Amino acid sequence: MPLDYLPALWLTVKLALVTSVLLLIIATPLAWWLTRWQCGFKPIVQAIIALPLVLPPTVLGFYLLIAFSPDSPLGAFWLNTFGSTLAFSFEGLVLGSLLYSLPFAVQPLYGGFSQLDNRYLTVAKSLHLTPLAIATKLVLPLCKSSFAVAFGLSFAHTLGEFGVVLMIGGNIPHETQVVSIALYEQVESLNYTGAHTLSLVLLAFSLLLMVVLYWFNGKGGLGWNSQSR
Amino acid sequence: MEFSVSLNQRVSLSASFSPAAKMLGVSGVSGAGKSSLLSALAGAEPSAKVNVDWGIDAARVGVVFQQPMLFPNLSVQDNLLLSKRYAKQGSIEFQKVVEGCEISELLQRPVTTLSGGEGQRVAIARALLNGPDILLLDEALSAIDITRRHRIYRFLSANAETGYFRCVYVSHDWQDLALFSDALLIIDKGRKQHSGMTQDVLNAVSVDELGSNPFALLEGEVTQTAEQSAHALQIVSIDNTPLFVNQCSVVDSRAKFVLYASDVSISIPAKDNSLESEQSSILNALCCEIKMINDSEAKTSGKVLLTLQAGNQCFYSRISVLSLSRLGLEKGQQVVARFKAL
């Protein structure tokens, strides 16, 4: 019986993994730019990025559903390019999750980059380090805990996704049926044994993830800050 | 070397210095804008308007802050090697820098275990290894003890003299500024107060600006170095009088040392004018003339400040009003200034 849930579990992990990797790639330059950008419009941009934190996921899901429809420019472009619709597809879920979890990747990185003492960068530039060397030898090691937190939080948050998935993905086994949706279905059909199994798996996994995150953050999160004399 | 810097309301000044000035000292009271000036010269102030001619095309500018800002994820050695990897051709050799900054025993240490002074030495070494044409030091030696600090200044000065780089250093310590700079820039409230060759600036700076214990910079010929002598003191000749000196900077057998007013006592010469007749632990005695007696603080502190001249060099002595009257000192009188080997 529990083996029936494996596809949903695998799909959830795959979605979370793809989303968090893509988010690190997107959020790193975005957060870096945001840290350095001084402009009156900055709070507006910050607010837009933070919006998924407070917006009911169904609202986000609804707008995404509209945007994914072949009538909209994005939906039409996708259909023309790839020959399939975005709605009710794994790719659509990834796109939705990216938006939904964006603040969970951007905010830790923004925090880490803001705390990075500017004089490290001044010194590194005065030593003629290349931008790549500055990124890999300095920023990445000094902000590694921020990167870990950004990755972990996006991963965990995508695991817990429900409303957005329901709106844009529906409940297609092997394609869009993630654990949270499968759980909902079990409850709907009054299969409480299955619901218990899925809930427990999600609960245990999320708890483990958060413990690892806090352990990592507590160990390294303040490390470079207290070391900078 | 000349620059003009304008940074918000904090700094607005321009200054130019002779090409002979390899070591430029910058000073001023706290909050005068010294750090802002250096930061702007380092190109780290985006809002600053900086116009600078270092006298070298496409000059590489290295900067060291009071806080060493060593990369904490790397060991001391890896910090140095990283800098070396991006160095320009023909910069100073690794071993020479490590010895000059006295960090041989620190190489394997993690950066996080270094004390403030150790970190500063490593930071200076890291900057030097990169081969800067201009080295900006923002109180970068402040946590190093005086003897070692002077050795490192001497090392920097010698390499600047060789033409490896020019150094602009901010310091609060008048002795460091007087001993090791060729030129000085004194700023106040972000504006230039004095600038020029060191001795000229020191002459222009009023006694009040030198603080409660004014000093003079004396220069003389080294007749015996500390290494040659049995007592580890240099012998410097001023006005044909041999003086024993401990802390000094020597360039081409010319020695400079700083003499504080509080370190100088006055005595009346013996009838036969012989200085050796009396025994004292105070090694130095210099015949001089009282040029001025400043008693403006006599009422409040009970002290007067004498300006003395030996040969063509002036220096100060701070003595009590009581001594002044007991010895019956007057302007124009010949006296003997005595001070310990400093």
Image (spheres, coloured by chain):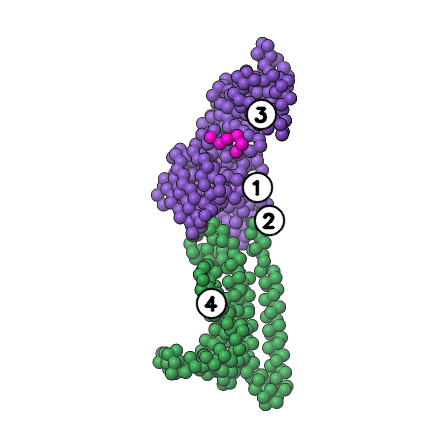
Chain colours: A green, B purple
The quarter of the rendered structure image containing the N terminus of chain A is bottom right
Q: Mark 2 points at which residue?
A: B113
Q: Would residue B205 be counted in the magenta stretch?
A: yes
How crowded pointer 3 is (Cα within 10 Å; few <14, some 14-19, many 20+) is rated as some
* Helix, strand or loop under label 2: helix
Q: Which amino acid does label 2 sit on?
A: Thr
In the rendered image, residue B121, in percent from the top left (x then y), is placed at 53, 42
- The answer for how far apart the CA atoms under marks 4 and 2 are is 43 Å
Is disc 1 in contact with disc 3, using a CB cutoff of under 8 Å? no
* Helix, strand or loop under label 3: loop
**Of marks 4 and 3, the one in the foreground:** 3
**B53 or B330, nearer to the observer:** B330
Give left or right: position of B229 versus B15.
right
Q: Which chain carries label 4?
A: A
**Of marks 3 and 2, the one in the foreground:** 3
Boundaries of the magenta span:
B204-209
- The answer for how far apart the CA atoms under marks 1 and 2 are is 15 Å
How many circles with numbers are drawn on the protein? 4
Q: Which chain carries label 1?
A: B
Is disc 4 in contact with disc 3, using a CB cutoff of under 8 Å? no
Q: Which chain carries label 3?
A: B
**Of marks 1 and 4, the one in the foreground:** 4
Residue placed at 56% from the left, 17% from the top?
B330
Q: Name the residue under label 4.
A: A44
Q: Name the residue under label 1.
A: B143
**B309 or B302, nearer to the observer:** B302
* Helix, strand or loop under label 1: loop
